[in-house]
C-alpha cells in the first residue's frame, strides 16, 4: 500500500486501508478476454455497429423531423421561432424514453444495481452481458450523433460549450470504459443521466405549447417541478452518492490499489460530468424559481 496516493488513502480512511488486501492478487488482470462472442469488449465489430446505428439515427432524425414533428409543429400552430426547438426536444424525448427503458431493464437484471460494491468484487477479466453490450452500442451511436448534430442540426444555445464538453466526455467514457472493462459502472452512469433528459425535453415541449395557449400556464409550476426533482434525485444525489463514490472508494477497497487501473483518468471524467450536472442544476433552479 506504500504506493497508494495520499488523496486515495484519505478518501478510503486509514482503517479501511489497513483491512485491504495489500496485493489484490485475486483481481490480477490478465488482459482482455479472448476475441469472440461478447467477451472481447472493444473491437472493430463494435465500431461497425456504432457507425451503422449512428447513420440510422441521423436518418431517422431527418425523417421524423421532416415527416412527423415539423408538420406537427405547423399543424398545432407553434410560433415560428419555437418550431425548430420543439422538433429537437421531441427527438430527444423519443430517444431517451426508449434508451432509459432498456437501461432500467439491464440494471434490474444485474446483481450490482442495488449494491455497487459488487461492481468491483468479481475477478478479471469480466464478460459483458448481451444487454449491456447492446446498450453500449446504442448509447455510443447516439452520442456520436449528438456530437455531429451539435455542429449541424441542433439550435445553438447559451450552454453551447458545456454541451460540447458533455458529448466529448461521454463518448470518451463509453469507449474507454468498454476498452478496460468498466462497462458495468458505465451502465449506472447512463441510468442516472438519461431519465433527466426525458423530463427536461418534455417540459420544453410543454413550454412551447404554453406560448400559444396561455390558459395552460396555471400548470407551469407543477410541470416544471419535475425537472429539478428528477435532476436532484438522479444526477445530484444518486450519481455522486452511488456511482462516483463507488468508483472513487469501492474500486480500491475491493480490488486493491495495484489493480485500480486508470483510476485518475476515469474518476476525473466522472467528476467533470458531476460538475456539469451541478452547473445545469443551478441554471434549472434559477429558471424554476422565476416561474
Image (spheres, rainbow, N blue to C red):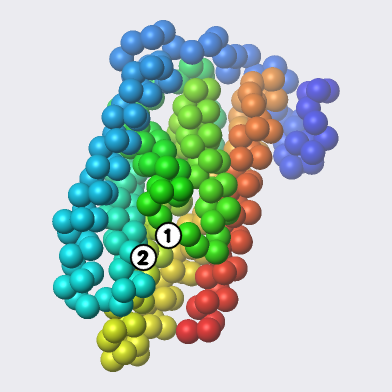
Direction from residue 203 to residue 125 in the image, left or right? right
* Frontmost residue, 173 versus 234: 173
Q: Residue at x 43, y 76 (%)?
A: 225
- What is the CA distance from the residue labelled 2 to the residue labelled 1? 7 Å
Circle 1: element type: loop
Q: Which residue bears the numbered disc 1?
A: 155
Q: Which residue bears the numbered disc 2?
A: 85
Circle 2: element type: helix
Q: Residue at x 27, y 86 (%)?
A: 213
User: Residue 178 got which mark?
Assistant: none
Q: Is residue 119 above or below residue 242?
A: above
Screen quadrant of the N terminus? top right
Direction from residue 269 to residue 141 in the image, left or right? left
Picture coordinates of residue 275, whole percent (x, y): 63, 54
Picture coordinates of residue 220, whole percent (x, y): 38, 83
Q: Is residue 75 above or below residue 141?
A: below
* Frontmost residue, 280 versus 119: 280
Amino acid at each position: 500500500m506504500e504506493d497508494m496516493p495520499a488523496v486515495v488513502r484519505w478518501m478510503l480512511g486509514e482503517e479501511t486501508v489497513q483491512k485491504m488486501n495489500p496485493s489484490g492478487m485475486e483481481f490480477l488482470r490478465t488482459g482482455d478476454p479472448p476475441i469472440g462472442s461478447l467477451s472481447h469488449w472493444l473491437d472493430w465489430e463494435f465500431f461497425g455497429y456504432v457507425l451503422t446505428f449512428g447513420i440510422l439515427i441521423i436518418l431517422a432524425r431527418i425523417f421524423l423531423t421532416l415527416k412527423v414533428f415539423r408538420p406537427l409543429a405547423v399543424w398545432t400552430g407553434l410560433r415560428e421561432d419555437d418550431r425548430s426547438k420543439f422538433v429537437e426536444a421531441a427527438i430527444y424525448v423519443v430517444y431517451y424514453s426508449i434508451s432509459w427503458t432498456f437501461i432500467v431493464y439491464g440494471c434490474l437484471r444485474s446483481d450490482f444495481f442495488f449494491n455497487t460494491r459488487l461492481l468491483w468484487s468479481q475477478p478479471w477479466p469480466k464478460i459483458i452481458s448481451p444487454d449491456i453490450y447492446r446498450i453500449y452500442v446504442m448509447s455510443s451511436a447516439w452520442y456520436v450523433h449528438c456530437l455531429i448534430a451539435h455542429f449541424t442540426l441542433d439550435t445553438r444555445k447559451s450552454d453551447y460549450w458545456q454541451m460540447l464538453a458533455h458529448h466529448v466526455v461521454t463518448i470518451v467514457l463509453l469507449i474507454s470504459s468498454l476498452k478496460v472493462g468498466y462497462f458495468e459502472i458505465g451502465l449506472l452512469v447512463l441510468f442516472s443521466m438519461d431519465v433527466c433528459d426525458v423530463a427536461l425535453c418534455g417540459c420544453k415541449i410543454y413550454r412551447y405549447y404554453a406560448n400559444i395557449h396561455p390558459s395552460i400556464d396555471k400548470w407551469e409550476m407543477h410541470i416544471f417541478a419535475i425537472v429539478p426533482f428528477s435532476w436532484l434525485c438522479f444526477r445530484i444525489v444518486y450519481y455522486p452518492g452511488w456511482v462516483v463514490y463507488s468508483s472513487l472508494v469501492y474500486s480500491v477497497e475491493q480490488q486493491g490499489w495495484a489493480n485500480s487501473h486508470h483510476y485518475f483518468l476515469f474518476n476525473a471524467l466522472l467528476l467533470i460530468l458531476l460538475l456539469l450536472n451541478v452547473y445545469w442544476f443551478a441554471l434549472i433552479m434559477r429558471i424554476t424559481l422565476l416561474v
